[in-house]
Image: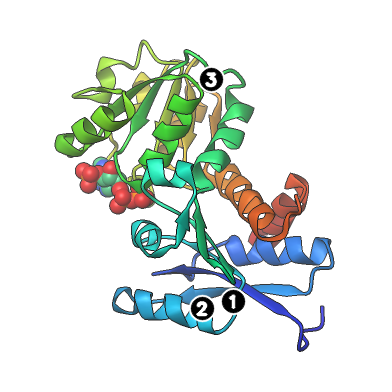
Amino acid sequence: MTIDGKTEVYGVVGYPIKHSLSPVFQNFAFQHFYVNAVYVPFEVRPENFETALRGLKALNIKGVNVTLPYKEKALELADYVDPHARSIGAVNTLKFTDEGVYAYNTDWIGFLKAVKKLVPEIRDLKTLVLGAGGSSRAVVYALKVEGARVFLWNRTKDKAIRLCEEFGCTVVNRPEEVLDDVSLLVNTTSSGLRDEDPPLFDYRLLRPDISVMDIIYRETPLLRTAKECGCKWQDGLDMLLYQGIESFKIWTGLEVPYQVVRDAVASYLL
Ligand code: ATR
């Protein structure tokens, strides 16, 4: 693709950002539709976030994803916030317009689309969510919107209690307490990013009829054991791709096929 005077600029703002896969597949999506636009990473230090946001507007950037650690801050600074994003308390997609900055959360939609490939029917599903950070809020929100029953465990119990009061779920003291009762387990903590992270519970206790999702997009020790135990499982790549497809739709009105973004990432990771 030729970059010329009319090329529009999109991107992703985070710190750190070098590991992000979003530029890989968002650029493929633009190319798929012959849209004259590029998507670039913006590594912005925390002390510069507000200045960077003003700069993005001044430079006529059309839209960005925001990722860690800016998902809450971006919500505060936006002019218009989508009601789902407001309920979740975090945004991951900004659209810059002449009227102001519009903010959305597509993580919860990405999670729902991904998890439904693992468990098609969510209503009344008993689910255990591990973690009570920003990602957990999007996951729990999505599960509650679909009518699931959510049990929640977090290392810091106070945060679990607060999140459960807000979203109407049930705190557990240890994951083991409800393992025999739930059909879906979702890890939203960052434990498992490295193989040496201590396990959150004894993963060998997983029964084969539990479906296990880890929102980290690598094979974590949890997923490895889930496989060994005969569970259905899914890593975080589909959630990432589906949230990206939704962001792209917000910016362009176009729906990029899942397989296009999946192939883009697969050929990059080869
Ligand atoms: P994110 O937006 O990715 O959710 P976050 O808001 O910083 O990031 O939340 C991180 C989550 O991972 C929290 O639930 C955190 O638990 P605490 O609330 O107790 O800090 C959890 N977490 C991170 N490292 C963990 C570990 N080694 N063991 C257990 N939980 C961990």
Q: Which numbered disc covers residue 42?
A: none
Mark 2 lies within 8 Å of ligand 1 (Cβ measured): no
What residue did someone put label 2 on? 56
Q: Where is residue 111 in the image (x, y as percent from the top left)?
A: 53, 38
Mark 1 lies within 8 Å of ligand 1 (Cβ measured): no
- Graded by Cα atoms within 10 Å as few (under 14), some (14 to 19) or many (20 or more), the crowding at tag 1 reads some
Marks 1 and 3: CB-CB under 8 Å?
Answer: no
Kind of residue indicated by mark 2: Leu
Report helix, strand or loop for mark 3. loop
Of the residues under marks 2 and 1, which one precedes in the sequence? 2
Q: Quadrant of residue 45?
A: bottom left
Residue at 74%, 80% in the rendered image: 7
Marks 3 and 2: CB-CB under 8 Å?
Answer: no
Q: In this view, does 144 lie above or below 207?
A: below
Residue 190 seen: no
**Separation of disc 1 and disc 3 at Cα?**
38 Å
Image quadrant in which the N terminus is located: bottom right
Q: Where is residue 227 in the image (x, y as percent from the top left)?
A: 52, 29
Residue 45 seen: yes
Kind of residue indicated by mark 3: Ile
What residue did someone put label 3 on? 122
Left or right: where does residue 255 sit relative to residue 124? Answer: right
Of the residues under marks 3 and 2, which one precedes in the sequence? 2
Q: In this view, does 133 lie above or below 35?
A: above
